[in-house]
Amino acid sequence: MIQVQGFTFNPFQENTYVLFDETKECVIVDPGCYEPEEDKFLLKYIEENGLKPVRLLNTHCHIDHILGNYFVATKFSLKLEINKLELPILEGSPKWGKQYGINGKLSPEPEVFLEEGDVIEFGNSKLDILFVPGHAPGHLAFVSHQDQFVIGGDVLFQMGVGRTDLPCGDADTLIKSIKEKLFTLPDSYAVYPGHGDSTTIGFEKKNNPYVRL
């Protein structure tokens, strides 16, 4: 069984996730740790729980979701894994960060490119990948069918959706991704978003004013 531990980091209040199972192998998704104290907090949790990080994943590469990439990649000798369409976003992130007064260490270059249909394996667990562009051109979501949840990044929020006024954002594409990909999951599936509280697919189908079915 996969356990999901979330942390809220950096001035953008971004949600970082550590996923692990009984083997203690874990994957780190969208590390947003920015201040040294946030690096230490993430490291302390991993060490105190005896976890072994084996994969570093980005749902997408906006600045708030990659601020901890350098720390995680170097500390645990991990390769960054993203969708190839996020390369321009990753490369442009330092420029956008400076506009917000953010000057973090540069993310390493990706070494693994992920596509819909690929499977993320760690320990005794696996995550399926969905391609859900709109908020970002190469946005991915990671789904556990066994444990009924999705790590959704900035696509679907509790009573909201991701913004589309950033470079390469597209509102119609985002809504299509939600309706044709995320909303095909069972209502019981939990959604762990990139910002704010968790929700469920069923709740958002009925109540989300942007994509209510």
Image: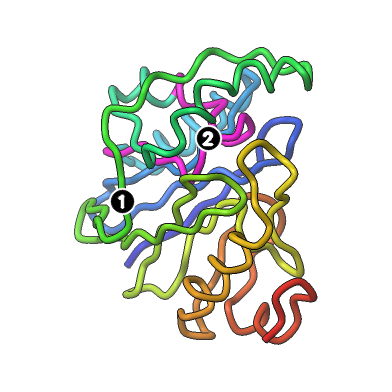
Q: CB atoms at circles 1 and 2 under 8 Å apart?
A: no
Q: Toward which corner of the image does residue 83 lie, by quadrant?
A: top left
Q: Secondary structure at mark 1?
A: loop
Q: Toward which corner of the image does residue 7 lie, by quadrant?
A: top right
Residue 109 sits above or below residue 152 on the image: above
Q: Secondary structure at mark 2?
A: loop
Label ID, residue 115: 1
Q: Residue 74: horizontal and vertical position, in percent?
A: 36, 17
The colour mode here is rainbow
The quarter of the image holding the C terminus is: bottom right
Q: Earlier in the sequence, mark 1 or mark 2?
A: 2
- Decide if residue 174 is on the left or right side of residue 81: right
Residue 157 sits above or below residue 88 on the image: below
Q: Residue 165: horizontal and vertical position, in percent?
A: 75, 44
Amino acid type for the residue under numbered disc 1: Glu
Q: Nearer the viewer, residue 205 or 173?
A: 173
Residue drawn at 50 percent across, 47 percent down:
17
Magenta residues span 54-71
The quarter of the image holding the N terminus is: bottom left
| Crowding at mark 2 (Cα within 10 Å: few <14, some 14-19, many 20+) | many
Q: Residue 158: horizontal and vertical position, in percent?
A: 71, 67
Q: Nearer the viewer, residue 191 or 162?
A: 162
- The span from disc 1 to disc 2 (Cα, nearest Å) is 15 Å
- Decide if residue 53 is on the left or right side of residue 106: left
- Decide if residue 38 is on the left or right side of residue 110: right
Residue 161 covered by magenta stretch: no
- Decide if residue 193 is on the left or right side of residue 88: right
Amino acid type for the residue under numbered disc 2: Cys
Residue drawn at 37 percent across, 37 percent down:
84
Residue drawn at 43 percent across, 39 percent down:
85
- Circle 2 is placed at which residue position? 61
Residue drawn at 62 percent across, 50 percent down:
135
